[in-house]
Image (spheres, helix red, strand yellow):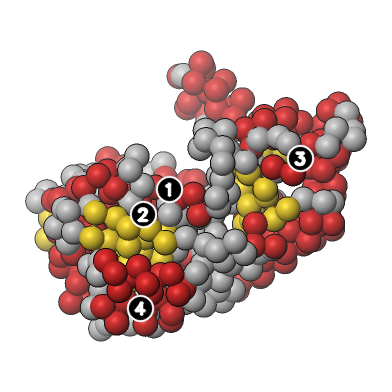
Amino acid sequence: MKYPALKKNNPKLFKLLAKEQKRRAEVINLIPSENFVSEAVLEALATPFTDKYAEGKPHMRYYFGNLVVDEMEDHAKELALKIFRLSLKKWGVNVQPYAGSIANLAVYAGLTKTGDKILGMSLDHGGHLTHGHKASMTGQWWNFEHYGVGKDGRIDYAEVARLAKKHKPKIIVCGGSAYSRTIDFKKFSKVAKSIGAWLVADVSHIAGLIAGGAHPSPFPFADIVTTTTHKTLRGPRAAVIYARQELMPAIDKAVFPGLQGGPHENTIFSLAVALEEVLKPKFKSYIRQVIKNSKALAKALVAEGFKIVSGGTDNHLMLVDLSPLGISGKEAGEILESVGIIVNKNAIPFDVRKPWDPSGIRVGTPAVTTQGMKESDMKKIAKLIAGILKKNISLSVSRKEVSALLH
């Protein structure tokens, strides 16, 4: 997009936009939670839907003038169900949450009281802040217990069952932001049912993989499913909540009026565009390539002497343990960014370093796959990362190699 009005009327801001466009065109983006949306998704964000207040649910608004908005939001909800092949008789859906954090908060608020017990995955073992970390309000308003991974880097389901039996939480949350292995939703469901808990599957990272048939679905087993809409779904930054029909009214009330005011209808419109793209055959091809690239990158990094948490990956991401190299994730991230490779620093399980300067980096392949990269490119990227962090090649040479990979 060229943004002619912005260029004419807001030259300073336009220059910042141009700088960001140039930056992202010149880097290899390995952050697994980022992606590149289509031109159509971008266009949809900048539509007159941005002007409309629409507090409430479709056909139950507090503002008038929402006949078209209602029709549009209904369509977005239908698409949200369709990408996972869900029946409206069994599942309800809310497409209004501003973000994944709000979606998870709404689920907890809708189904429990503050102070109730919830069991979630520990942040430093691959979970998310909103799975009850003390820095998040979820960890301050609810009484969270946490499970994690074993020394092999995989979820210890026996430990999940033991903790559930001991603490008897109202909710068990599965899913994470830095877990590279297939999640066994059936095992989680068995544990939840054994103590009468609701099972919440946070699939924010793997939603696109599930829709594309590359990861087992949580819907046969979970009571509630939350997801962000960017990452592997390649949509705008927002979230969706799915719940069994009998639970949906409480979830809806928690979203509005509990936590939000008017929904961002331009974002919902943009989400609908992205969901229509998910339903096209080429999306499944894209997801298959994401997985191929991820496995190729993990294999190549191991071949270059890196330690991957859990030994590899089943999905779109992996955690690289840098402690054998004697450098931190912060240091590695800064060095890599200086040559145009973008990652994020990340704690590893049983990390001895502080969160702001952890032992690992998290890397993934959604964005580079959108850019058209294949397995052979992943081998080159792994070799580049190894050369840079082990100081076998100069930064100036590395920058040229990054540029060559992008053009």
Sort mark 2 into few (<14), some (14-19) or many (20+) by Cα contacts within 10 Å. Answer: many
Sort mark 4 into few (<14), some (14-19) or many (20+) by Cα contacts within 10 Å. Answer: many
Sort mark 3 into few (<14), some (14-19) or many (20+) by Cα contacts within 10 Å. Answer: few
Q: Under tag 1, what secondary structure?
A: loop
User: Which residue is disc 3 drawn over?
Assistant: 325
The answer to the question of whether label 1 and label 4 lie on touching residues, with beta carbons closer than 8 A, is: no
**Residue 248 location, x and y as percent?**
20, 69
What's the amino acid at mark 1? Arg
What's the amino acid at mark 4? Val
Q: Viewer-proximal residue, 113 or 269?
A: 113
The structure residue drawn at horizontal position 46% and vertical position 19%, both measured from the top left corner, is: 10
- Relative to 90, say whether 238 is above or below: above
The structure residue drawn at horizontal position 51% and vertical position 37%, both measured from the top left corner, is: 355
What's the amino acid at mark 3? Leu
**Residue 214 location, x and y as percent?**
59, 73
User: Which residue is disc 1 drawn over?
Assistant: 237
Quadrant in the rendering for residue 67? bottom left
Q: Is residue 101 left or right of residue 251?
A: right
Mark pair 3, 2: CA separation: 31 Å
Q: Which of marks 1 and 4 is in front?
A: 4
Q: Residue furthest left?
A: 62
The answer to the question of whether label 2 and label 4 lie on touching residues, with beta carbons closer than 8 A, is: no
- Relative to 339, say whether 180 is above or below: below
The structure residue drawn at horizontal position 23% and vertical position 78%, both measured from the top left corner, is: 196
The answer to the question of whether label 4 and label 3 lie on touching residues, with beta carbons closer than 8 A, is: no
Mark pair 2, 4: CA separation: 18 Å
Mark linked to residue 191: 4
Q: Viewer-proximal residue, 225 or 118?
A: 118
Residue 286 visible within the image: no
Q: In this view, does 80 lie to the left or right of 12?
A: left
User: Which residue is disc 2 drawn over?
Assistant: 131
Q: In this view, does 57 lie to the left or right of 73?
A: left
